[in-house]
Image (cartoon, helix red, strand yellow):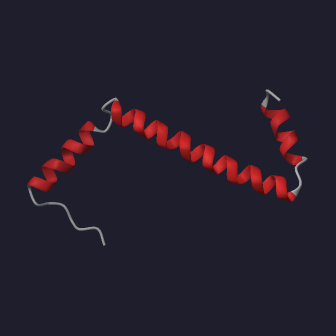
Amino acid sequence: MSTMPEIQLAIQKLDARELGELSVWFEEFVAKAWDEKVASDAKAGKFARIKDEISREEAAGDLLDFP
């Protein structure tokens, strides 16, 4: 299976148990990919501007406590 239509067809053929297992696996796969992307972006400095802004707001006493 190397194309989206083939993958979709295979998924449609799964029984309920297999579909549940695939769903759990896919959610974990997507979560891991997201975590890796965020970590990579952070390492590349893509959040530096936001971090600096938060530091300035904290120093100015402008941050609110999160409930």
Locate the C terminus by quadrant: bottom left
Q: Residue furthest top?
A: 2
Q: Quadrant of residue 15?
A: bottom right
Residue closest to the eye, 65 or 35 = 35
Q: Quadrant of residue 66?
A: bottom left
Q: Number of numbered discs present?
A: 0
Q: Residue at x 19, y 42 (%)?
A: 52
Q: Is residue 16 above or below residue 42?
A: below
**Where residue 60 appears, x then y in whole percent?**
8, 56
Taking the image as shown, residue 54 lies to the left or right of residue 1, namely: left
Q: Residue furthest bottom?
A: 67
**Where residue 45 appears, x then y in whole percent?**
30, 32
Q: Residue at x 14, y 55 (%)?
A: 58
Q: Residue at x 77, y 57 (%)?
A: 20
Q: Residue at x 35, y 36 (%)?
A: 42
Taking the image as shown, residue 55 lies to the left or right of residue 33, namely: left
Q: Is residue 39 above or below residue 63?
A: above
Residue closest to the eye, 26 or 59 = 26
Locate the N terminus by quadrant: top right
Taking the image as shown, residue 64 lies to the left or right of residue 67, namely: left
**Where residue 32 appears, x then y in whole percent?**
55, 43
